[in-house]
Amino acid sequence: MSKAQRLKSKAQSPKFLSMVVLGVLLLLTDSSRCATSDSLFAAGSEAYIAGDYHRAARAFRESVQLHPGSGSLQNLGNAEWQLGNTGRAVLAWEQSLWVNPFNQAAYTNLRFARKTAQLESPELAWYEVVSSWLPANWWAWVAGLSFWFAVAIVLLPGIFRWRRLAWHQAVAAFGLAIFLLSVPANVGIASRSRLGFILQKNTPLRLTPTANAQLITRLPSGEPARLERVHGRFVLVRTNRTAGWIERDFFGLTSSVGLNTPNWSPSKSESLVKR
Amino acid sequence: MSLMLSQPRIDVESPVVPTAVFDPPVVRPGALAIYRLTFNALEESIDLPIEMPAPTGAKLRPGGHGQMLAMAGPTLQPRTSYNFHLRPSQPGEITMPEFVATVYGKPVTVPAARLQVMTDLPATNFAAHCLVLEVPQTNVFVGQSLPVTILFPGLVGIAMQGQAPVQLIGQGLLTDPSSLHPRFEPRPGPVPGRNVQAFLYEGIVTPISSGKLSFFAQSFVAARPTGPIAVTAPGPVPGGPAYTLLDSDPVDFEVRPIPIEGRLPGFTGAVGDFSIGTPELATNVTRVGDPVKLTVKVRGDGNLLRIVQPLAPRPRHWQVLSAGGDNLPPQIIQAQGFTTFNYTLIPLTEKARFTPAIPFSCFDPERQAYRDLTIPSIPVTIKPGVVPGDLAALMQANALSRETEKEPVLAGLAAAPGLAPGTLVPLQRQVWFALMQLAPAFGFLGLWRWDRRRRFLQQHPEIILRRRARRALRRERRALNRAAVEQDAQAFATAAVNALRIACAPHLPAVPRALVGTDVLGFLTEAERAGRKGHIIKRLFAVTDAARFDSNPGGTANLLSLKTELDALLDRFAERLV
């Protein structure tokens, strides 16, 4: 049997066909998700320009849940800011920078919001500052590719009996150096992924994770905090000055788009604040 | 020290005599009566019961309280007053019972007081003496100045003693004592159509926290106002004139926070209807490094005493220093109706053609919007001059920080969704990415194993020959079986000979097609060569040779019947290839 015949028979097998169908379906699903996200983005922009900030925020939020684009997050922040939701606006802009640190508009908006609302910026360690130079996922690729590139340059000449040249070692050293330099940034990404922001004005910070616990202080909307632990519907957070438990719904992580938005409604949050 | 020693002594040793009276002693139902409690003791030393005894038939509401030091001979007599308000609803007699207070750590009995509530009282009966607090509006913004008027009952003497003549008491308020000023004003009197001269104080209150706030006014009067205040205590209060603490009913008002949206640059907390005059520059022609004074007058209905000069900007060609506001007494600033911002401008280069604009804004509570009051630029001529070293350094610093000093503004919408990962969760925390890192590891491991195997096979080529021979033998045996099924004796013979050659070639070593029957027979024992097996091999080779070289080949009869024996022979040769 010739090679062509073998390929033909393989192509006609049900397993192969089902895999092809599955792949096409996945591609179609992804492209339809992109199309829906784009249409939501356009609808949000139109609503924002028309001054309907509630509709704009809803559209951008849904667009972000489908496809967390840097521009969508920036626009979501603008809409939330116009609605007076300082914490949600700050979170959206921080997420926009998390996705794309080169988004100058999101950076300017954050400066504007923090200056206007008298909010603090998160206190970042040096490795976290380094990690903010590139998009969060890029560091993982940089580390992975540079490491395996260096390993390949060391191993492949021996395996394939290429003549060992001086530049092989130089390139391998370069790849290893890139890998070592990216390690702190990856550590920074890991620690920054636990950074979040208070979403609700005057969020009560409690001593223990119970609704009737002693109140330590009240945190302003947009205050940065680090997630330490989760216990039921409470999270233990550490701000620049203190630590305590707050309701999970009042806290939004930079590295998670779905922690709060699906179940969040202003009435629910406000009732929790009053309680 | 001598000044301190020359001060009169405060009398804290005289027996404490409390007085308790109702003012007025007789009221109509629903009218205001004030229960006045006075001690000749320091306020800090007095502990009233936490629960004041309730009078029968009315409810007391705490009012003002304060302390006064009155001259009594060579000593200062402390005088502490507490006011409680009540409005009896039914005619009759209300008695405030006797109770015990603690003064200087000792129990002091406060006498009982009685109030007559009568329906038919003459028109000349005096009302309770109290202040009237007038507030023009009760819905304001944080920081908004609120003018208040405190109306005194009749012409009384104000007792001022190291503090404001009138105190405005309340939480979340800022009162400027210097803003208080007295005035006479004709007000409607008790006789309809006839005005009387009323004594009043005007001042400014500034709320500094949002929410519902409440405040009231109080003041000591040294002269008794018109009409008697009956003292029902066992004796007169010793030591000088009868000071009376007057207070007002509390005024509630709503304070809203200033909106964040729309805040303009240069906002320093100015709330009110302000305007700026034309900025005045000391000279329009100056040299590099020579300071020039810039003054701007700010007018408005807000609290000019509390207005904060905007921060000096850091333009490229200028050094701007805030020279502070007016060094005038607050009363004069309030009276003149404007305050002045002073700046010292130092040109750093002769390139400057205009003075820098200084951002300033205020919040207008009437329009509920911010108003831009930026101090405009003024054209100037700068002549060359010597720049001192520190100014040169400042120029450099200004040039560097020019970009960063830009006032941030809310950026517009993004035109496209932009760079988008699948999720915000970083790859470092996703399992698939960690597992994906194993793929190159497995790849390199496979390559290494492959390399090792290859090196081994290079040193043992017979393994490859045998492997190839086994593969070729399987192929030829399939052809052999096919020929047997098709009853093709010639093809059967050819496949059989090929298979025998392939099976024996690796052991010689030689190319399979180079082998002849004798070579194959060499792998059999002497007995086998002479026996059946030798016969089969010879016959097969004979048939194939005849097919190749004889024009009329034959001898294929019953050849296919040898298959079983041939398979056994090939199995035996195949075993040697393993």
Image: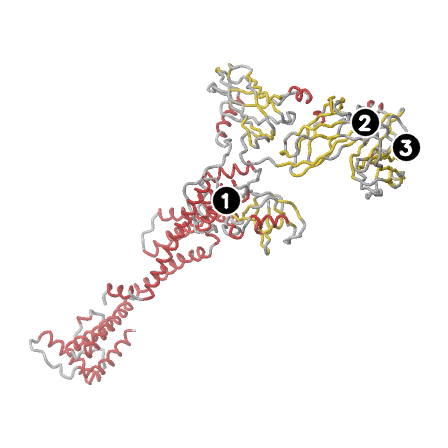
Q: Are marks 1 and 2 in contact (CB under 8 Å)?
A: no
**Mark 3, mark 2: which one is toward the viewer?**
2
Q: In the image, which disc is placed on residue B221?
A: 2
Residue B101 seen in the figure: no
In the rendered view, tell whether residue A83 sits above or below residue B541. Answer: above
Q: Position of residue A101 (x, y in %)?
A: 46, 42
Disc 3 and disc 2 on one polypeptide chain? yes
Q: Quadrant of residue B469?
A: bottom left
Q: Identify which residue, B382 or A73, lies in the foreground.
A: A73
The residue wearing badge 1 is A54
Q: How many marks?
A: 3
Disc 1 and disc 2 on one polypeptide chain? no
Chain letter behind tag 3? B
Element under label 3? Answer: loop
Which amino acid type is marked by label 1?
His
Chain letter behind tag 2? B
Q: Identify which residue, B402 or A218, lies in the foreground.
A: A218
Q: Earlier in the sequence, mark 3 or mark 2?
A: 3
Image check: B524 left or right of B108? Answer: left
Which amino acid type is marked by label 2?
Val
Q: Quarter of the image for the N terminus of chain A: give it.
A: bottom left
The residue wearing badge 3 is B13
Whole-angstrom CA distance, mark 3 to mark 2, is 25 Å
Please name the residue shown 61% across and 21% down the image.
B340
Element under label 2? Answer: strand
Q: Position of residue A106 (x, y in %)?
A: 47, 40
